[in-house]
Image (cartoon, rainbow, N blue to C red):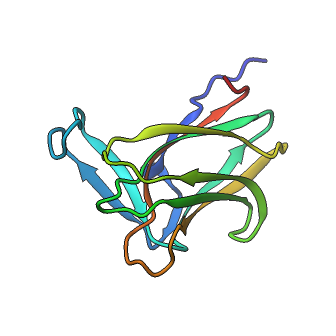
Amino acid sequence: MIVLRPNTIQAVDFDEESGTEVMNIKAGDYPDVNEDLTIIVGDEGDYLLFKDLDLTDIAGLEIMTSAMSMTLQGGVFAFRLDKINGKPYVNIPIKTTSTPLTSPLQKAVNPVKGKHDLYVIFRAANKGDGKPVAALRSLKFKRGLE
């Protein structure tokens, strides 16, 4: 049997969230932004939930993210399975940059089988500095890592 399905999920397509903000950025609003973008921005402890994802045979996760130092502080996206404090799936560190452009970051995941709820938790580099952590545009699930 062949199963055809997209392996990329837009961050804005979450099932539940806590504390995050959806931002629509128009082409030209910032230098080097040449297309309209929809991103999710979150503070320390905010999260997105994607329900019922089949993570069988997934080896890696690539995210499109940004942490422009003027407005965001960077930190870590902590991915957890089934509960907000559930089994770690992967942690992806986010460094600040000088541009608002989203860029891909890829990391191997802890392999699991079957369907799971996936929590994406925003973890701040410097708790209490007042800036949101980072912007998330999309998640791409990979069967292998390039």
Residue at image point 77% right, 66% down: 86
Q: Residue furthest left?
A: 28
**Could you say where residue 53 lies in the image, as x and y percent from the top left?**
68, 46
**Relative to 146, residue 33 above or below:** below
Residue at image point 52% right, 69% down: 124
Res 36 seen here: yes
**In this picture, residue 82 sits left or right of residue 47:** right
| Observer-nearest of 100 and 87 | 100
Quadrant where the N terminus sits is: top right
**In this picture, residue 135 sits left or right of residue 98:** right
Residue at image point 72% right, 28% down: 143
**Could you say where residue 70 lies in the image, as x and y percent from the top left?**
29, 60
Dividing the picture into quadrants, the one containing residue 118 is bottom right
**Could you say where residue 46 lies in the image, as x and y percent from the top left?**
51, 71
**In this picture, residue 47 sits left or right of residue 19:** right
**Relative to 80, residue 2 above or below:** above
Residue at image point 35% right, 58% down: 69
Quadrant where the C terminus sits is: top right
| Observer-nearest of 67 and 109 | 67
**Relative to 25, residue 47 above or below:** below
Res 119 seen here: no
